[in-house]
Structure formats: structure tokens, C-alpha cells
Image (cartoon, grey):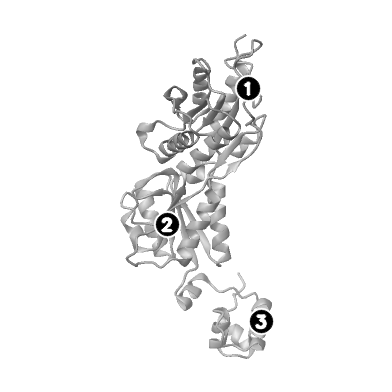
Amino acid sequence: MAEKKPSIHDIAKAAGVGVGTVSRVLNERANVAEATRTKVTAVMERLGYRPTFAARHIRTGRSQLFGFLTDQVTTTPFAHDLIKGAQARARQADRMLLVIDADGDDRVRAQAVANLIERGVEGIVYAAMFHHEVHVPKALHEVPAVLVDSFSSARDFPSVVPDEVLGGRMATERLLADGHRRIAMVTNDFLTTGYPAAVGRLEGYTQALADAGVAFDEALVREGSGNADSGYRWTHDLLDIDDPPTAFFFGTDRMAMGAYFAFTERGLHVPDDVSVVGFDDQHYIADALRPALTTMALPHAAMGRWAIDHLLTAPWGDDRSPPQRRLPCPIVERGSVGPVRPAQGATPERSLTGRR
């Protein structure tokens, strides 16, 4: 038979104080003498007292819980940083996360929101699998909520997303800084999808070229599909054009990985013959490539922290427009970018296309 757990009454009796005093100690109220607080705390430790969640919730009216509702994000390589960032900020504020993955199912998503609200969560973070518009359950309006890596069409929820335009701009500027002017861009998705990552990164690319006085050349742009095979095929295609690029900006690290295979087949070396910048900072790719890949990091940990911080500090229910925050994608320097050579692509021994 399990040993009976001590109650708040047992603590009061053993400490020689009233139940109200023990309650004030548990709730960290100021109107308790320090000596009394120390004595009560010592008794609780000695007897192994742990207040139940239900009792604490009733006493304080606060659950100290945040819901973290994901939409397949736990199956992506970025889930760790996103959840870790949110959890670290929640822990600083003595809060816990209840994580539920809806797996892209609308019914599961709606039920998850209802379950979290029933458990008295103080707020909900809704995290999408990738940056796009989402349609959230109506019940999400009943509790403070923040959308992460996503936004609602009505912009009626606070949201935090990567600054895709700035990321594309910085990636291109990095290549321009080393003297490259023939810079290819392979988007991470088809532009017709309208996904912010594909559209925004291309916009940043064109902005950087314009600011540097480099004419936009549509012959240097391809619409990829994010995977390694796409990067491999479009790299070969771009190397075959007249006046091929000396540098490549890929919308994903996976496409950059495919490009490395194509460069090897052409007898080209990174970064001596051609420079490469990726996007996403998927460590198992970027760190493993040789040379390691310079890339733009998606700010998943920072987005997780921002979401929890907003739930903790922002007023809820006022008439102000919810903030729509964009966080920068920092560049991670590795070894895939080098200065353009004066005679690059013109040497008789090896042209940039790899043909002799």
C-alpha cells in the first residue's frame, strides 16, 4: 500500500503554525516572517511535501502552464530549437509547456485547443511546420495566443516569423562583398505557391543586386523544390548557360548539398571555383559538407523565446493591433564563400562549366 502523502494540515501541525501561514509560504506571499518561512520550508522538505497541481491552481487562480500546439513541427529538423527556445523562456518565468502535435489534422487541432483551455493554460503558442498563413480553431480566441512561423489572414493574432526578405538580401550581399556579380538564385519552392520564404528570399536577392548596381538577369534564377535533387539538376542547368554564375544562393541547405555533387562532377571546387550560400542552417548538412556551408540560420529558438515572452508581458484583450514581428536570419559563416577570381571562367585549363 502506498504511503500517504503529507497534506498542508500535516505541514502546519509539524511546523506549529496555522494552515493559512503554510498557504502564504507556498504562494510566496510577503507577509510572512523570514524565520517562519524558513521553518515551514524545512518541514516541507523533511516530510517530502509536494503541492498538487489542482490545489495550487485553486489557491492562486493560475496554472503556470502554457500550451504549445504544433502542426507537424516536431517532425522537422527545427523542432528542437523552437521548443528549446520557448521552454527556456517559460522556465525563467516558472512556467511549464504542455506540447501537443496536431499532425496537420484540423479535428485534432481543434480538440487540442479545447483540451489546453480546459486545463487552464495561461496562453497558447501555435507553431507551424513552415512559414505560411494558417487557419486556427475559433476557440484559440478564448485565451492569449501567439502564432509562430505563421500568421492569420486577418492578422488578429500576434505572430513571429523569419524576416525572409532580409535573409535573402544578406545572403546575396555576402556574395557581392567578395566580388561576385554573376550570382544565381534557386528558390526553395515554386513562386506560384505564394509561400513567404520563396517569394521573400527572391525579393531580398533582387534588392541586394539593385543596391549594388548589378542588373537583374532572369537567366540566373530557377524555381526549385527544396530538395537535394532539385539543387543538383538546376546547378548543372545554370553551369551550361552562356556566362555562367560564379556564385550560387540556394533557398535551402538541401539544395546546396545537391549542388556540391554537381560541382564535383564538373571538376569545380568550392570556394576556389564557385561560391555557395544556403538557407536554413541545418547542421547535419551544413557542418557535414566539405567545405562546410555558409548559410542563413532560421531564428527558431529566438521565435520560441519571443512567443513566450509576449504571452508573459503583453496585455491581452485590448484594442491595439496585435504585433506581427519579423526576426532576422543571421548568417553563419563557414567555408563555402571565397573571392571571385579575376580570370574566373576564362582560364583555358578549366572553365567554370567544367569543360576543358
Alpha carbon separation for disc pair 1 and 3: 78 Å
SS assignment at label 2: strand
Element carrying mark 1: loop
Left or right? Give the position of 114 relative to 209: left
Q: How many marks?
A: 3
Q: Is residue 65 left or right of residue 135?
A: right
Q: Quadrant of the N terminus?
A: bottom right
Q: Residue at x 51, y 59 (%)?
A: 97
What's the residue type where badge 3 is placed? Val
State the residue at coordinates (57%, 79%). 26
Q: Classify residue 285 by image quadrant.
A: top right
Q: Is residue 281 visible?
A: no
* 1 or 3: tag closer to the N-terminus: 3
**In the structure shown, which secondary structural element does the residue marked by tag 3 occupy?**
helix
Q: Earlier in the sequence, mark 2 or mark 3?
A: 3
The residue type indicated by label 1 comes to Pro
In the rendered image, which quarter contains the C terminus? top right
Label 1 Cα crowd, 10 Å radius (few <14 / some 14-19 / many 20+): few
Residue 17 falls in image quadrant: bottom right
| Above/below status of 13 relative to 292 | below
- 166 relative to 266, above or below: below
Residue where numbered disc 2 is placed: 146
